[in-house]
């Protein structure tokens, strides 16, 4: 198939604004190309190459939904890159069998049915906003096969129980395995309230262990608040590291903490740590609940239970790091992810009334 992939409009690929979607783009391109498909990626200007032909579009970045209230209206900035990308997708659609939307945005969900080439949506976050819930529900009602989700609980947050769940995939050879870690806790994510850095800081303080923090500062006031509220935490601020560099660093950690306050859709960082042999202690919520094998690759803790979090770190520290890596390989490679994506796309095209003639 010739597949047009439309990336997120919240930031250029490679700068971290797009969070997990940026990693998904690379894995998806690699996996589907390996399966013989021809991909083109459409992304905001200044995006880094992602392994297939790319078209970039200028314009003002889209504000992310996770920074807005549930009842926030749909926003369309003047000269917005989202609208510009979808105008370009419109002109390119006839050369493709399918358009694959990776952006968590109202516009493509609303616009998709107006295209002549089917537009499929890989939804990257859980339910966050009334406007997005409505847009997802509309597609679920009219074209249910066109939606896919990373995880089951993410999908169910929209009230959908029988949709496509495709997980995520990682190029596992690019992650450096480390057998003997440093006495260091790790935390990876955008530094923003929904990611819950404060609970990891509290656990690190209880354990008197340093906490390495990798990620883009999305909310500087939040970072200042967490720092001030945890004066005894030995933060090691690492900033945003390019993905390939992070994959060489992460293995140094004894344990990774994932402490989201929101419905984490998948939580790439969990799997990426495991790929380096690092056990994970995470809140039993959203993606991590499905990706952590409790007792084998890490431990799950009730959200908000910081003392329990610290206790589980000590147990996780004793897990066999080879087993962690092995289990990760079994579950999260690029090839099975691409197979699931392909099955979803083919099933969607097969049952889709918009399936037209050869482009
Ligand atoms: N990441 C990175 N460098 C950093 C911090 C994070 O490349 O310094 C990547 C990380 O590897 C992960 C992504 O950013 O793949 C964040 O995705 P995740 O699903 O964990 O959270 P999201 O930001 O999508 O909520």
Image (cartoon, rainbow, N blue to C red):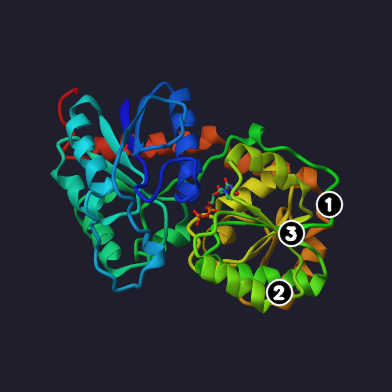
The answer to whether residue 330 is left or right of residue 216 is right
Q: Position of residue 90 (x, y in %)?
A: 18, 36
The answer to whether residue 236 is left or right of residue 239 is right
Provide the secondary structure element on which disc 3 rests: loop
The answer to whether residue 342 is left or right of residue 228 is left
Q: Quadrant of residue 355?
A: top left
Q: CA distance from mark 2 to mark 3?
A: 23 Å
Assign the C terminus to one quadrant of the image.
top left
Asked if residue 301 can be seen in this view, the reply is no
Count of numbered labels shown in the rendering: 3
**Disc 3 C-beta below 8 A from ligand 1:** no
The answer to whether residue 232 is left or right of residue 247 is right
Tell me what residue is drawn at x 79 percent, y 47 percent.
Answer: 321
Q: CA distance from mark 2 to mark 1?
A: 20 Å
Residue at image mark 1:
182
Assign the N terminus to one quadrant of the image.
top left
Of residues 11 and 296, the one nearer the viewer is: 11
Q: Position of residue 223 (x, y in %)?
A: 58, 68
Tell me what residue is drawn at x 62 percent, y 77 percent.
Answer: 304
Tell me what residue is drawn at x 50 percent, y 36 percent.
Answer: 27
Asked if residue 89 can be seen in this view, the reply is yes
Q: Which mark is residue 202?
A: 2
Q: Mark 2 touching mark 1, by CB under 8 A?
A: no
Q: Is residue 138 above or below residue 102?
A: below
Q: Residues within 10 Å of mark 3 (few under 14, many from 20)?
A: few
Residue at image mark 3:
295
Q: Residues within 10 Å of mark 1 (few under 14, many from 20)?
A: few
Q: Mark 2 touching mark 3, by CB under 8 A?
A: no
Q: Compare marks 3 and 1 and give the one earlier in the sequence.
A: 1
Q: Compare marks 2 and 1 and give the one earlier in the sequence.
A: 1
Of residues 219 and 83, the one nearer the viewer is: 219
């Amino acid at each position: 198939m010739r597949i047009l992939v439309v990336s997120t409009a919240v930031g250029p690929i490679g700068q971290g604004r797009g969070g997990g979607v940026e990693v998904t783009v690379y894995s998806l391109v690699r996996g589907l190309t390996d399966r013989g498909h021809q991909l083109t990626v459409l992304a905001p200007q200044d995006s880094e190459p992602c392994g297939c032909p790319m078209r970039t579009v200028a314009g003002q970045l889209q504000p992310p939904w996770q920074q807005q209230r549930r009842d926030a209206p749909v926003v369309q900035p003047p000269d917005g890159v989202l609208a510009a990308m979808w105008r370009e997708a419109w002109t390119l659609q006839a050369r493709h069998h399918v358009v694959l939307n990776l952006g968590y945005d109202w516009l493509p969900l609303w616009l998709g049915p107006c295209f002549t080439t089917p537009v499929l949506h890989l939804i990257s976050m859980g339910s966050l906003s009334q406007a997005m819930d409505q847009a997802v529900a509309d597609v679920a009602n009219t074209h249910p096969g066109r939606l896919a989700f990373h995880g089951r609980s993410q999908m169910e947050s929209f009230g959908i129980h029988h949709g496509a769940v495709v997980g995520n995939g990682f190029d596992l050879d690019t992650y450096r395995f480390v057998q003997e870690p440093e006495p260091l806790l790790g935390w990876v994510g955008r530094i923003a309230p929904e990611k819950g850095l404060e609970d990891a800081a509290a656990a690190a303080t209880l354990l008197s262990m340093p906490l390495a923090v990798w990620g883009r500062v999305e909310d500087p006031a939040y970072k200042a608040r967490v720092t001030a509220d945890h004066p005894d935490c030995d933060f090691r601020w690492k900033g945003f590291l390019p993905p390939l560099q992070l994959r060489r660093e992460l293995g140094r950690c004894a344990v990774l903490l994932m402490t989201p306050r929101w419905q984490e859709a998948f939580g790439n960082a969990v799997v990426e740590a495991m790929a380096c042999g690092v056990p994970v202690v995470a809140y039993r919520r959203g993606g991590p609940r499905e990706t952590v094998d409790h007792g084998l690759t890490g431990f799950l803790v009730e959200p908000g239970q910081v003392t329990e979090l610290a206790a589980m770190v000590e147990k996780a520290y004793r897990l066999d790091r080879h087993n962690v890596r092995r289990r990760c390989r079994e579950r999260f490679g690029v090839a099975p992810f691409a197979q699931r994506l392909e099955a979803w796309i083919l099933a969607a095209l097969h049952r889709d009334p918009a399936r037209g003639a050869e482009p």
